[in-house]
Image: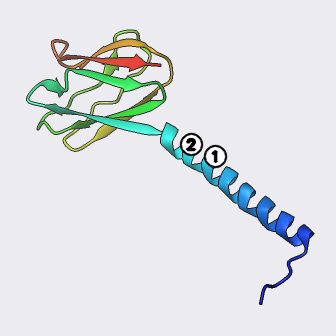
Amino acid sequence: MRLAIPSQLRLSAAAALLAGVLTGAVASHAVVGAEEATATIDNFTFAPARLTVKAGTTVTWRNEDDIPHTVTASSRLFKSKALDTDDSFSFTFTAPGTYEYFCSLHPRMTGTVVVEP
């Protein structure tokens, strides 16, 4: 025996299914666009020394050294406070380009973030 389903009910169910798919697609796109990358500070070095990321990525530097360090953009775009052991600093790179940075307490410590579109 086959049940008769009114055409309006079938249309409403299809519309609800489509709305759910579209909502899920939008939500998953927002999550996919949010990226993160990490760099460590240890033994007077930034690792990796050159980090390549996509625009919109948040980079977090974590000090694993036993003395304070900073993360300071050569262009002055960003600057952390002095980071003690286990402290971290994050910055979101929104525009493509090459961003050089250094430790203002130990200027020979340098690194680069390359941001691709």
Question: Viewed as shown, does residue 77 lie left or right of 114?
Answer: right
- The residue lying toward the viewer, choosing from 3 and 32, is 3
* CB under 8 Å between discs 1 and 2: yes
Quarter of the rendering containing residue 77? top left
Residue reaching furthest left? Answer: 43
Task: Give percent across and percent down for residue 44.
Answer: 11, 25
Label 2 residue SS: helix
- The residue lying toward the viewer, choosing from 4 and 51, is 4
Q: Image quadrant for the N terminus?
A: bottom right
Task: Give percent across and percent down for residue 72.
Answer: 33, 19
The Cα atoms of the two marked residues, 1 and 2, are separated by 5 Å
Residue of label 1: 26
Quarter of the rendering containing residue 61? top left
Q: Is residue 76 above or below residue 9?
A: above
The total of numbered circles placed on residues is 2
Residue reaching furthest bottom? Answer: 1
Label 1 residue SS: helix
Q: Is residue 112 above or below residue 67?
A: above
Which kind of residue does numbered mark 2 sit on?
His
Q: How is the image coloured?
A: rainbow
Name the residue at 15% across, 12% down: 108
Q: Is residue 17 above or below residue 71?
A: below
Label 1 neighbourhood size at 10 Å, few (<14), some (14-19), many (20+)?
few
Name the residue at 20% across, 13% down: 107
Residue of label 2: 29
Task: Give percent across and percent down for residue 30.
Answer: 57, 43
- The residue lying toward the viewer, choosing from 39 and 89, is 39
Label 2 neighbourhood size at 10 Å, few (<14), some (14-19), many (20+)?
few
Q: Which mark is residue 110?
A: none
